[in-house]
Amino acid sequence: MRLSTKSRFAVTAMIDMGMRQHQGPVSLAAISQRQHISISYLEQIFSKMRQHGLVESTRGPGGGYTLHRDTQHISVADIIYAVNSPDRKEDVSDEAAQNGYVSTEELWSHLNQKMEDHMQSISLHSLIATQLSKAGQVPPSQSLKRGVFAQKPQPAMTAKAPNSVFALGGFLANSH
């Protein structure tokens, strides 16, 4: 198990999404804005988490990501394994082994197992509960709208000018 920046960002994004899951699908743009993680990096992370069955995606307006499983059934280890490629075992050449190379593979394997057991014992639910107790209530989601949807509707304009040349002539003749 590798603890990397990618795994740290993945856990952070999952907590953010879990805190807002009751509001519907959460967009990567919203997570990016709140957590200061680039959207392209989040796309890579969420693609891997979707492949591992941790999240589901919804396309279209109002789309985004939702959790595929209950937060009590997602561990930190699940998230880390989803976004990191499997670790490669260290290969020791025959010559190095004959020349007294001391393998520490057992030490690292034991340490890795302890770390994996600990990460498996931490649920996403407990991390969300901790964040909610610190932050209080989650503010409502502000949807990021783009294009024509970002514009506020303008009030209808009513013309006070005549709508033809003849009406304009009559208007000008009567105004003097």
Image (cartoon, helix red, strand yellow):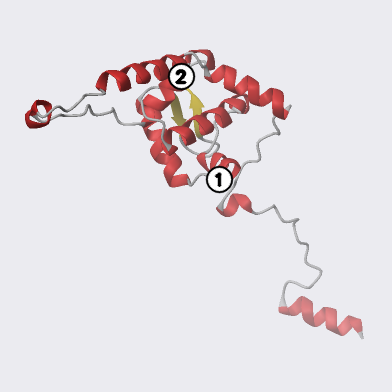
Residue furthest to the right in view is 176
Q: Residue at x 56, y 28 (%)?
A: 15
Is there any visible trace of residue 14 in the rendered image?
yes
The disc, 2 or 1, on the residue closer to the chain's N-terminal end is: 1
Can you tell which mark lies on residue 66?
A: none
Where residue 168 appears, x then y in whole percent?
Answer: 78, 79
Mark 2 sits on what residue?
A: 119
Residue 50 appears in view: no
Judging depth in this view, the residue of 70 and 81 nearest the camera is 81
Q: Name the secondary structure under disc 2.
A: helix
Looking at the figure, which quarter contains the N terminus?
top left
Q: Give residue 36's mark.
A: 1
Q: CA distance from mark 2 to mark 1?
A: 24 Å
Give the answer, above or below, for where 36 lies relative to 72.
Answer: below
Q: In this image, 91 relative to 109: left or right?
A: left
Which residue is depicted at the point 15% across and 29% down?
Answer: 92
Label 1 sits on a secondary structure element that is loop
**In this picture, is 76 found above or below 3?**
above
